[in-house]
Amino acid sequence: MVATTPTTVNVYDAKTHLSKLLARVESGERIVISRAGKPVAILGPISEPRGRRIPGHDRIVIHPDFDDPIPEFDPDYFHPEDPLRPAKE
């Protein structure tokens, strides 16, 4: 059974029982290694790496209007109450 909170072991016990701890890690458990009661490392399973990316398999969508002119920016429309905007003359 996989514990929800990591087990804590001191450095001496980790060195003495490393093969047993690795067997527990292989089953999915995470183990905290501490020195003088202070956690210094986590012994945990390595996640499987992702598969190799295949070029050309991305989905790219280019909309028909992507190169249309951009309308003029109207700051009054977007932020009419902005106190940092200069006052109209």
Image (tube, grey):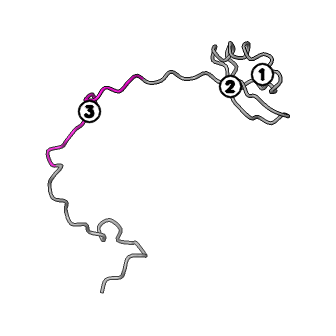
The kind of residue tagged 2 is Leu
Q: Nearer the viewer, residue 44 or 7?
A: 44
Q: Residues within 10 Å of mark 3 (few under 14, many from 20)?
A: few
The kind of residue tagged 1 is Ala
The kind of residue tagged 3 is Arg
- The residue singled out by tag 3 in the image is 59
Select label 3 or label 1 by which is in front. 1
Q: Residues within 10 Å of mark 2 (few under 14, many from 20)?
A: some
Marker disc for residue 55: none
Which callout, 2 or 3, points at the residue further toward the start of the chain?
2
Q: Which element is circle 3 on?
A: loop
Which callout, 1 or 2, points at the residue further toward the start of the chain?
1
Q: Is residue 33 above or below residue 22?
A: below
Q: Which element is circle 1 on?
A: helix
Q: Quadrant of the C terminus?
A: bottom left
The region drawn magenta spans: 51-65
Q: Residue at x 35, y 68 (%)?
A: 79
- Residue 82 is left or right of residue 57, and the answer is right
- The residue singled out by tag 1 in the image is 14
Mark 1 vs 2: CB contact within 8 A: yes
**Relative image position of residue 45 (x, y in whole percent):** 61, 21
Mark 3 vs 1: CB contact within 8 A: no
Q: Residue at x 14, y 44 (%)?
A: 64
Q: Which element is circle 2 on?
A: strand
Prevalent SS, magenta region: loop
Q: Quadrant of residue 18?
A: top right
Q: Nearer the viewer, residue 68 or 52?
A: 52
Marker disc for residue 43: 2
